Amino acid sequence: MKTLLVTAPMPPGYFEAAIRAVDPSIDLIEHRDDLRDEELAGIGAVLAWQFPPGLAGRLSGLRWVCAVSAGVDKLLVPDLAPAVAVSRIVDVEQAEGIAQFVALMALRHARGLAVYEQQQRDRQWKRQPVAVVRSRVLILGTGAMGGVVGEMLGKIGFRVSGWSRSSSRTLHEALAEADIVVCALPLTDATRGVLDAAAFAAMPRGAYLINIARGAHVVEPDLIAAVGSGHLAGAALDVQQREPMPADDALWSVPGITITPHIAAQSSPQTIAAQFVQGLRCVERGQTPPNTIDRSRGY
Ligand code: OXD
């Protein structure tokens, strides 16, 4: 079965070498805009980060899409045939890397590091009351990623709880009891824009948001307003609505908001290659590959 690599903005060579190291016989084709319909019709599998517009509908022989990522939202495009299986990478090391990033941002906020960074710029040696790190952290999303993040934060000393759509509390009830909110939700129609003005108003004054999921979970103008008014203390956003975030984006210059360019953690090409090859073998045998998502739910 032929596999199309659609990995931009990451170079396909990065994955190609890792896949060939696992199984040199796999037939790989790098995506190019000028691939003809006959070439595309022979493709049975795709390894991708996102579909360029119009490509999915031209892959008439497609059986399986494997994301190079934990999230699959960029692959669930309307022209992807309903029978095509979609799976994602589930990587404990990546989840631990993300948990480290969340811990870093949560501790930075809870221990008031920004105040001391400013004091250093001002050459001011001044002790502030020392906070005890028992802040209440609410993790939105209790899947593989949210679970690892919660475990690490619990070990550090935070009081951790989780929320998902099957929780007995409403989202706003849960937000009302959180000093730090971590977004680890999948991006679906139900979760797009879930962190909006009403959600921020439900959070206690001085609360802090950490987003390691997708920029589209957050209504960014509402966040800017909530931080600007002083209701929220700030946010750490590793993901944004527009990636790469353009130089004129309003988020860059909001005091209290920390921007990082989707670097919380990445799976290695070796991990992706191993999971891809295992999945491809399942598809070839007519079996469901591991970590296949429920397309009706979107995760
Ligand atoms: C993601 C990833 O889904 O980096 O963002 O895996």
Image: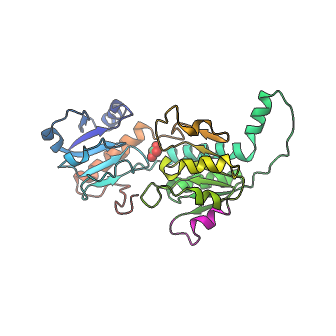
Q: Nearer the viewer, residue 270 or 292?
A: 292
In this rendering, would 39 be left or right of 203?
A: left
In the rendered image, residue 65, in percent from the top left (x then y), is placed at 30, 49
Please give left or right for residue 143 compared with residue 179 in the image. Answer: left
Left of 252 or right of it: where is 296?
left
Residue 42 in view: no
Residue at 58% x, 47% y: name it. Answer: 99
- Work out which residue is located at the far bottom of the displayed protein and give it: 168
Which residue corresponds to the image point at 56% horizontal and 38% vertical from the top-left?
250
Quadrant assignment for the N terminus: top left
Name the quarter where the C terminus is drawn.
Answer: bottom left
Which residues make up the magenta segment?
Answer: 165-177
Asked if residue 223 is positioned above or below residue 258 in the image, the reply reads: below
**Residue 165 appearing in the image:** yes
Q: State the count of labels.
A: 0
Instruction: Write the residue at 53% across / 51% down.
Output: 218
- Judged from the image, the quadrant occupied by ligand 1 is top left
Q: Is 73 a magenta residue?
A: no
Indicate the position of residue 82 as horizontal and vertical percent values: 25, 58
Q: Main secondary structure of the magenta part?
A: loop
Quadrant of the image occupied by residue 6 = top left
Q: Residue 206 in the image: state x and y as whole percent.
A: 72, 52
Magenta highlight on residue 166: yes
**Left-right relation of 199 to 47:** right
